[in-house]
């Protein structure tokens, strides 16, 4: 959730910079009334962005709760591959093929 907030916050700050830059290019000075229009525009953009984000999350099947993962299981084949890998690395190091 914090990552979504971080992304949204900096996106809105980038939008704010763009709005202020475009207002200055047009010759407008930042006054209280213009500042109110800018804030209202940012709120509207943030709301629209939040709605799009919520819709995209719901389309992916997230319903607001975290599903627990099942604990990983180690099969005999996994144990054999791990043992074979460990033996290969040990032999390579003992026979002088190590780093350095």
Image (cartoon, grey):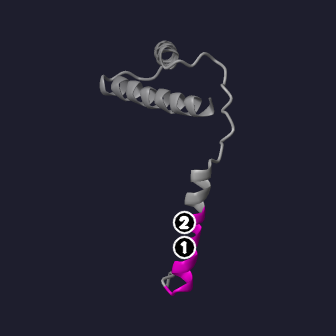
Q: Which residue of the protein is positioned furthest toward the left in this rendering?
A: 26
When the figure is inspected, residue 35 is found, relative to residue 93, above or below; the finding is above
Q: Which SS type dominates the magenta stretch?
A: helix
**Pick the front one: 99 or 2:** 99
Residue 95 belongs to the span the image colors magenta: yes
| Residue shown at the point (62%, 29%) measured from the top left | 1
Residue 89: image tag: 1
Is residue 77 left or right of 52 when viewed as pictured? right
| Residue shown at the point (55%, 59%) measured from the top left | 81
**Pick the front one: 72 or 52:** 72
State the count of labels.
2
Residue 54 lies, in percent from the top left, at 52, 16
Is residue 21 left or right of 44 when viewed as pictured? left
Distance between mark 1 and mark 2 Cα atoms: 6 Å
| Residue shown at the point (54%, 29%) measured from the top left | 9
Q: Secondary structure at mark 1?
A: helix
Residue 47 lies, in percent from the top left, at 51, 13
Q: Which residues are magenta?
A: 83-96
Residue 85: image tag: 2
């Amino acid at each position: 959730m914090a990552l979504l907030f971080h992304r949204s916050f900096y996106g809105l700050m980038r939008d704010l910079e763009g709005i202020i830059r475009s207002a200055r290019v047009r010759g407008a000075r930042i006054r209280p009334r213009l500042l109110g229009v800018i804030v209202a525009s940012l709120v509207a953009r943030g709301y629209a962005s939040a709605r799009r984000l919520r819709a995209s999350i719901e389309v992916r099947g997230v319903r607001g709760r975290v599903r627990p993962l099942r604990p990983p299981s180690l099969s005999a084949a996994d144990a054999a591959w791990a043992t074979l890998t460990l033996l290969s690395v040990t032999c390579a190091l003992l026979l002088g093929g190590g780093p350095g």
